[in-house]
Image (cartoon, rainbow, N blue to C red):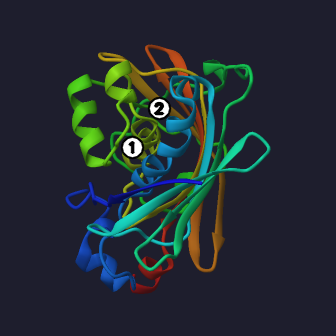
């Protein structure tokens, strides 16, 4: 088994999502503001990226689920172990030794079929975001597309923020897969006026690279909306493109309306 330790960093202390704020998170029963799930995903990506390099960024897959929070300032340990079937099992342990996130990654022998962008129609962002409710996130809803330009200098800051140890991204001049995944969060936030909310897991298939100056777009379709243990969940099927070409397809699951928010309403 390979492992590395890092000091977790909460990149979202000033974000609109107040689940990353210490005071709000503590009212939800957490010890402090949560490190974003997309950043925990970025920590775990060290495992397959260190094993397979650029090939994994171009055509690899990774799933991750976030069972417990990671907190700012904690020394956490990323674990990557070959499963024996060509996959890498991934885990993140907190200082108490508890596994707070886990997942798996793979590198297909040959590239999978690329998603058809026509299946993910572009749509304008709403002039006014809708409140977080089932009718705003009904299955089949096409979300407004989130667009951004990726700059290499922003990528350099991102690598510091997620405590990336590999030289791969700087040497190749490409965006980190955690940054690519973050765009699915941005698409959800740009369409719905969320209160505190929690990203709980994602499955990602990579199809290409994001390079300096690329026009990046995330198009997403709601595939499921449901309640579990009092929390309201949403699942998105998202496609991230760079200059119109697919770079990642993402199944993205979030608690968009936590039970605690409903109870305090």
Q: Quadrant of the C terminus?
A: bottom left
- How busy is the neighbourhood of tag 2: few (under 14 within 10 Å), some, or many (20 plus)? many
Residue that badge 1 annotates: 186
Q: Secondary structure at mark 1?
A: helix
Residue that badge 2 annotates: 218
Instruction: Answer above or below: position of 237 versus 217.
Output: below
Q: Quadrant of the N terminus?
A: bottom right
In this picture, residue 54 sits left or right of residue 114: left
Instruction: Tell me the residue at 22%/61% (across/down).
Output: 13
Q: Secondary structure at mark 2?
A: strand
Upstream in sequence: badge 1 or badge 2: 1
Residue 69 rendering spot, x and y as whole percentages = 44, 71
- How busy is the neighbourhood of tag 1: few (under 14 within 10 Å), some, or many (20 plus)? some
Residue 100 rendering spot, x and y as whole percentages = 51, 69
Instruction: Tell me the residue at 43%/41% (across/down).
Output: 178
Instruction: Tell me the residue at 27%/57% (across/down).
Output: 12
Q: Is residue 149 visible?
A: no
Nearest the viewer among 57 and 20 is: 57
In this picture, residue 113 sits left or right of residue 187: right
Picture disc at residue 251: none
The quarter holding residue 196 reads: bottom left
Residue 7 rendering spot, x and y as whole percentages = 30, 61
Q: CA distance from mark 1 to mark 2?
A: 8 Å
**Tag 1–tag 2 contact (CB < 8 Å):** yes
């Amino acid at each position: 088994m390979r492992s590395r330790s890092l000091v977790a960093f909460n990149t979202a202390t000033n974000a609109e999502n107040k689940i990353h704020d210490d005071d709000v998170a503590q009212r939800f029963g957490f010890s402090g503001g949560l490190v974003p799930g997309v950043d925990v995903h970025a920590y775990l990506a060290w495992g397959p990226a260190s094993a397979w390099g650029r090939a994994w960024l171009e055509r690899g897959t990774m799933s991750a689920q976030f069972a417990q929070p990671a907190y700012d300032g904690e020394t956490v340990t990323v674990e990557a172990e070959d499963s024996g079937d060509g996959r890498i099992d991934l885990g993140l342990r907190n200082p108490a030794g508890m596994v707070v996130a886990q997942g798996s990654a793979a590198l297909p022998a040959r590239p999978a079929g690329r998603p058809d962008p026509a299946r993910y129609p572009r749509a304008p962002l709403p002039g006014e975001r809708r409140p977080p409710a089932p009718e705003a996130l009904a299955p089949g809803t096409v979300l407004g597309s989130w667009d951004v330009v990726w700059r290499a200098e922003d990528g350099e800051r991102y690598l510091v923020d997620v405590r990336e140890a590999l030289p791969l991204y700087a040497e190749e001049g490409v965006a980190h897969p955690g940054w690519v995944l973050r765009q699915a969060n941005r698409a959800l936030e740009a369409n719905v006026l969320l209160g505190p909310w929690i990203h709980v897991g994602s499955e990602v298939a990579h199809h290409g690279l994001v390079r300096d100056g690329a026009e990046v777009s995330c198009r997403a379709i709601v595939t499921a909306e449901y309640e579990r243990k009092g929390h309201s969940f949403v699942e998105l099927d998202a496609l991230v493109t760079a200059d119109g070409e697919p770079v990642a397809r993402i199944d993205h699951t979030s608690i968009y309306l936590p039970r605690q928010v409903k109870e305090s309403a």
